Every structure is written in structure tokens, then in C-alpha cells.
Amino acid sequence: MEPRNKLRQAVIGPKREVSAIDFSLDTARAPFLNDENTTKDQLSRNGSCFNAKEGEEVFNVDFIKNLKDNPKLKIKNLKSPSQTHKNALEKVDSTAIKRKPEASARFKTSAYISSSKPFMLSNNDYYLYFCAMCKEEMSDLKSIIAHRYLVHNIISRKSSVKNSDLEPDVNDPNHHCQACEKTYRSKLCYRHHLYKSHYIRLTKYRTKNNVVPDPHNPNFHCRSCDYIYQTRIKYVAHLQRYHKMKLSIFPKEKPNILPDWNNPGFHCAPCNSTYKSKTSFRCHCISKHNMNKPKETSTNEFYSLNDAKNHCEICNITYKRISHYKEHCRHLHGINIEEVFANPDATPDSSDPNNYFSQHKILFPIVNKRSVDNKSIVGDPSYYCRACDKTLSSKGCFKKHLLAIHSIGELIQNDDDSLKPEIDNPNFYCCVCNWRYRSLSYYREHLRGTHRMVLPPLSSCSSDFDSFPSSIDPDLYCHDCKLRYNSYKYYRRHCRVIHEKVFDDDVKPVRNPNFYCAKCNRYYSTRGSLKLHLKKFHNLIME
């Protein structure tokens, strides 16, 4: 309260009603009131602290600036010429500062408006200069800047206001501020500029009366404010906000009854409203009427699959396919569907060419046809299997078919029983078959299929642990398998699946500026997505 007391001592005025402060923007240095060398000529020549109007005294803006710059000046040393009006500022607090009407065609200079009524605009709004800190109303921009400096000790930053003597038109259709000589793209931006730069607040002006509005007015007319709203939602929101009435936007016309959960027309009887879809109707029942989804009553009824319409009587839904209808009944209603056959006593024919028997889930043994000569089957150049009456696409597929179905060619006989293929051959060469394979996977497949060898896992094949692939290999090359990969993702997957190797996390900074996860080798577009990924998959909390 010390700055305010200083201001009270600095205010000089013999009149009971204090006029608004009129600050000029002259750059000349204003004389000080307590300076002994200051003369009356200097006061009149440099823009004195006293106005030329008789009976009114106002401050100069340079005098306000010098309150802080001059060390000789002390506000407490300022003496008022009239000791009977020391508490003039206290009367300012009790006196309502008049609001200034907006200029329509030409802008007026800052002046004190003595009208006791607020200026009404065409849209039922009015504006005033407002201090957001102490909720005080001012008459013009200069007054509120001086008030913020003297009372709150706030020095206004460099403002965009070029013409402080002009007042902006709050209802300018082009959103142009004459004081700042700037045009804004929208009404919202323009109003925001008025509030931030000019300290102008626009509010609804409502006359105080004892008329209570009718919340059930069919025309949505507020007789207290004399305004008609377009919809009931806006009308009820107005009554809730301005008249403090506790109302419901969607009142229950019949609060004692509940809507039908399975209503086919999606009609809510208590609210007398109809919805477009079942989802919106049931969401309304849950949120507004506090209803819960009723439990489906399990029934032992068996629905016939001979119904051509595939119609569900419970949900009143018809499906195009019988498979969808069966799935709906089984998962949603928990109903066991009994399949009805046209001839239940008949036995299906397993040799039917149309595979009609497959619908009955009959298991029958596989017939091995070994009546033909094996030599002729193996040496067939067209890859034709006479036993199965089937032609294979390639020689490899033909050999696999003979090995898997007919057990032909499962073992290659060699003269030397001691000669066996080398499992860890680095060149993938089979000494028994005299054939070299292009990769380790094909070579191991050959050993398992042709020579019927039981192979240990690759992780135990090598005795040297250093030969395992490295997680940071720049060439993405597996020395064990002699394979090179094109991407880091497939290289690490090969190491995990084939070699059963578990890698440690790469030592990389979590706060990577490129939003990069070193473990997954993946980039993210935003910091939030990287933070979510680290928390979900790696249990890392990124601050």
C-alpha cells in the first residue's frame, strides 16, 4: 500500500470530483514541483503539471517518468496547496469513473467523459479501460498506463500504439486499429489486440431488474435481457451463466420411466427424442438415464440353419452368409447351433469328387500307393508322380514330394560308411553328394532332409564365442552364416532367431535430437511419440 499512499499525497485537486488524468506525450522535460529553481514561466513554457482549465489540475507524463529517474524528487515531499483535500484519491475510489462512448466517424482525443451512463453499441456491448490487477476502470489509455506505473510499479513494455490520442473502433468491419495503424485478419484477433495492447474490455451490458426469465419459453426469449436466442441450448446456457439458474439442457419430460433398450425406432420415451442410430441411442440411455446394458439371457434354443434368410430374431438382423450368421449366434448370444442334415441316416462317401464329406469332419487313413515302380517315379523327366497322379512344378519340389509322401530317396547310399557330411563346413559343401549350397540354411536343410541328420542349434555349433555376430557390425555381416543383410532390422532378427543371441541395449543418448531409438533403429516424428515408445516398449521414462 506504500505506492498508493504516495499517489494519494501527490494528487492535487480542490474539487470534490476528480477529473480524468490527461497526459501529453511531449518529450520536453517537465519541471518538478519541489524544485526551487522552477519558475512559473518554465511551467507554462515546458508543459506544466497544471492544466489550463480553471479548477482542474492533472499530471504530465514526463512528471510520471521522473518519479523514478530523479533522485532529488520524493513523492512524500510533495505538498498539496489545499490541506482540506488530502484524501482526494479516496474520493476517486468512491466516484465511478465514466465510460467513454466509441467514436463513429472521427476519432476524438482523450478527454474526460462526464456522462453517467455507459455507452451502448449496436450489438448490446460496451467497452471500458480496465486494470486486470485491481479491477479498476479508467477513462483512457494514458490513465491506465500511469495507474499501472504508480500503483502497481509496472513499466509498460514497448507498445505498438503509434497514435495514443486516437481511440480504436471496437466494431470496425475491417478489423483495423487506427491507433496502431494495423489490420487484423479476424474479429477474434482484433479483440485480443484491444485487450492486450489497449487494455479494453468488452462485456455484455445488462440492465439490472427484478424480472426473472422463463426457462420454458417456447421462443427462447429472455425477458430480463430482452433477447431471443436461436436454439434451446444457447438459451439454457445463457440462463445458467448470467442468471445463475440451475437447469438441464435436455430435461426429462417423463422422469419416472426408462427408455426401452431394444427399441427398434431408437426412440427415447422420457425425453421424447429419436436418434439416428442404435449406437447413439444407447449412448444416450447410458449417459442421461444411467442405464446399463442388460445381460443377454442364455437360451438353449437351437436355431435351424435351413432358414434361407439367416435372420437373428433377438437382434433383428439378417446376414448374407450362413457362416456369418453362425458366428454371430455363437459369439454374441452364446447359442449352440445344431446342424440339420437332409439325410441324417446316410453315410457320406469319402471318395466323393466334390468333397461333400468334408462337412462332417470324418477322419480316414492316408492310402499309400506303392504299386508302381519306384525307379520309374524317380527318373521321370516331367516330374510326374504316378502314384498320386500329380505333376510337380520343379525337380526340387518333386524330390521333396517323393521324400515326404512316399519315403523315396530319404538316404543316399555311399560306399564309404565313415564318410559323413561336415556340419560346420564354411563353404556349405556336402562331400557325400559332391554339391555346394549357396547358404547355410539350404545346406542344413539338405543335411536334415537327405541325410537324415539331427543338427544341433546354431548357437552351439561354434566353439568360439567371438564369432557370433556383433550388434554394432557396420557391414551387417554374419560371420557364422556368411550372410549379409541390407537393413539393421533384419540383421538383428537373424541374430535373435538363428543364433539365439540376446543383445544388450545400445549405448545411445535417450535425448536424441532426431527422436531416434537406438535399440529399435527407428526414427519418430515428434518427441512425444518417442517418449511414448520408450515408456511402452523399453520401460524408460523420458523427462
Image (cartoon, rainbow, N blue to C red):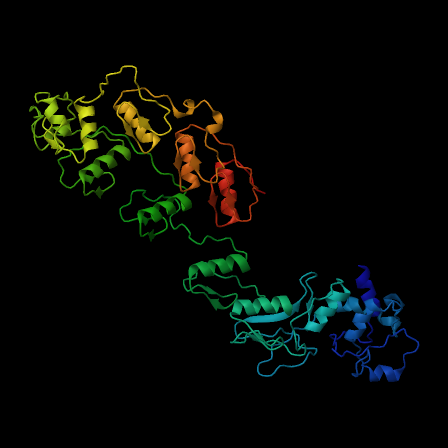
The one nearer the camera, 485 or 104, is: 485
Residue occupying image coordinates x 18% and y 24%: 405
Left or right position of 243 against 234: right
Q: Is residue 220 above or below residue 485?
A: below
Residue occupying image coordinates x 83% and y 65%: 6
Indicate the quadrant where residue 87 lies. bottom right
Q: Is residue 424 above or below residue 523?
A: above
The one nearer the camera, 168 or 298, is: 168
Left or right position of 21 against 433: right
Q: How many marks?
A: 0
Residue 241 rendering spot, x and y as whole percentages: 53, 58
Indicate the quadrant where residue 18 lies. bottom right
Q: Is residue 39 above or below residue 10?
A: below
Q: Is residue 188 above or below residue 266?
A: below
Left or right position of 431 against 191: left
Which residue ends up furthest to the top in the rendered image?
Answer: 417
In the picture, the quarter occupied by the N terminus is bottom right
The one nearer the camera, 509 or 40, is: 509
Residue 16 in view (yes/no) = no
Residue 90 rendering spot, x and y as whole percentages: 78, 66
Residue 404 rendering spot, x and y as whole percentages: 20, 24
Indicate the quadrant where residue 232 lies. bottom left
The one nearer the camera, 374 or 295, is: 374
Residue 405 in view (yes/no) = yes
